[in-house]
Amino acid sequence: MKENPERRIPRRDLLRLTIAGSGAVAVGALVSLPAATKPVDMKDKRRARYQADSAEVRDFYRVNSYPGAR
């Protein structure tokens, strides 16, 4: 079998280079700069958001006809 003079990089080496390049890109994406985070205000985090007597809650129970809802 004649060797093809145009082919300079063997197929297996090309596959290895492709895999190594993909790995390098993936590692580069994972090791990017860390995202800046906003400071958390614990007062707002612990604040009660659910209000049992709000109009939305009353409408929900009224529409879904739960017993005891008026």
Image (spheres, helix red, strand yellow):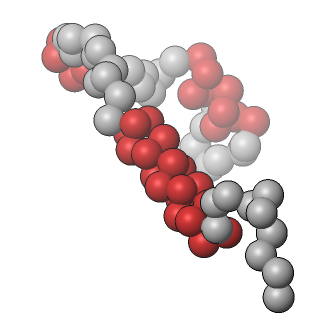
**Residue at the bottom extreme, as displayed:** 1
The image position of residue 19, as x and y in percent, is 54, 59
Q: Quadrant of residue 17?
A: bottom right
* Left or right position of 70 against 31: right
Which residue is located at x 47 percent, y 22 percent?
53
Q: Nearer the viewer, residue 67 or 44?
A: 44
> In the image, residue 16 lies at what x, y percent?
53, 64
| Quarter of the image where the C terminus is located | top right
Q: Considering only vertical position in the picture, is 52 above or below 10?
A: above
From the top left corner, tell me how far across and down residue 13 is, in percent.
Answer: 56, 65
Q: Is residue 64 visible?
A: yes
66 vs 38, left or right, is: right
Return the residue nearer the eye: 12 or 19. Answer: 12
Q: Judge whether 30 appears above or below 18 on screen.
A: above
The quarter of the displayed image where residue 5 is located = bottom right
Q: Residue 15, how many percent across, how many down?
A: 61, 65
Residue 15 appears in view: no
Q: Quadrant of the N terminus?
A: bottom right
Residue appearing at x 60%, y 72% in the figure:
12
Q: What residue appears at the point 22 percent right and 22 percent down from the top-left corner?
A: 46
Q: Residue at x 53, y 50 (%)?
A: 22
Left or right: residue 22 versus residue 45 is right
Q: Is residue 51 above or below residue 16?
A: above
Position of 1 with respect to 37 (left or right) is right
The tally of labels here is 0
